[in-house]
Image (cartoon, rainbow, N blue to C red):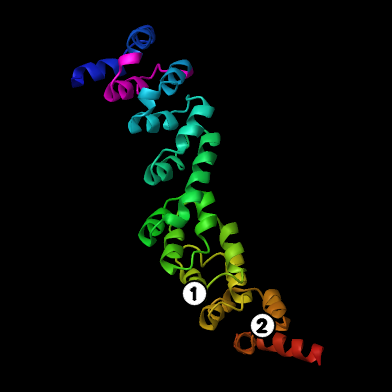
Amino acid sequence: MNRSRLQEIRRFSRELLLAFVEDELAALAEDEALALLANPFVNTAVLQKVANSPRLVAYYGVRLALVAHRATPQAHAVKLVHYLHWADLLRLSMEVQVPSTTRRAIDTQLLQRLTKLSLGEKISAAKRCSSALIKALLFDPDPKVFGSLLQNQRMREDDLLHFAGSDRALPEQLRMLASDGKWSYRYALRKALVLNPLTPRAAAASQLRFLSSRDLRQIHRNPATSVYIRRCIERLPGAAVEAASDRGERA
């Protein structure tokens, strides 16, 4: 069908749209169906008719448009999610106009397919994925994936606090977090990095001067704190007396 006819379908009034669906739905080609779905007057009833047509949903573009449309009946949208490509699922998982029920189904599909991704696909996904995928990728062993996650605008401090305090975190990832231009300035993360024995000692020591005297005393008396970190605390201006006093109290 020529372009002008497709534009006409996209601009049908509500009445013309309903009449068109009634008369032409059974014979629509893919481009016509997509033009129909792009019409601002398309409603749930029309979307259901399209979704109920095995011939139309056999077109990938139609399946994608139905999942993306906020008025598509949820049962149909959730079913069609299973037949979408990874890249489209990733994009739709971040689009707020997609209903939350559909986005949860999308996240489930993304998580199920995660193990099949190449490293490059994981790195790319980590930069812009949803919160559900962030949690799944957070402990990926490749530092490049973690580096991409740190750039993700949906990353939350709570997720990184969980990571920074975990024995599953790798030293290189903790070092990256300690030097990150955005996240390394968060006080809670600084403290968590110091407390985690897996944090490289230079990275942990670099956080000490930003901690309160109270936290430094607690870290100093913590049995799990390394001798190196204790000595670094004692060398801090104004902290040596408090640390020495700490040792005296334990003696």
Say what secondary structure mark 2 lies in.
loop
Against 219, residue 79 (above or below) is: above
Q: Amino acid at mark 2?
A: Thr
The picture places residue 115, in percent across and down from the top left corner, at 46, 57
> Does 41 appear in magenta?
yes
Q: Label 2, on which residue?
A: 225
Residue 124 in sight from this viewpoint = yes
Distance from disc 1 to disc 2, alpha carbons, whole Å, reads 17 Å
Mark earlier in primary sequence (1, 2): 1
> Does 114 appear in magenta?
no
The picture places residue 185, in percent across and down from the top left corner, at 52, 66
At 48% from the left and 75% from the top, the residue drawn is 172
Region of the chain picked out in magenta, as a range: 26-44
Q: Residues within 10 Å of mark 2 (few under 14, many from 20)?
A: some
At 57% from the left and 58% from the top, the residue drawn is 159
Left/right of residue 160 with respect to residue 54 in the rendered view: right
Q: Amino acid at mark 1?
A: Arg
- Which mark identifies residue 175? 1
Left/right of residue 62 with respect to residue 170 in the rendered view: left
Say what secondary structure mark 1 lies in.
helix
The picture places residue 183, in percent across and down from the top left corner, at 50, 63
Q: Quadrant of the N terminus?
A: top left
Q: Residues within 10 Å of mark 1 (few under 14, many from 20)?
A: some
Left/right of residue 169 with respect to residue 181 in the rendered view: right
The picture places residue 19, in percent across and down from the top left corner, at 36, 6
At 56% from the left and 78% from the top, the residue drawn is 204
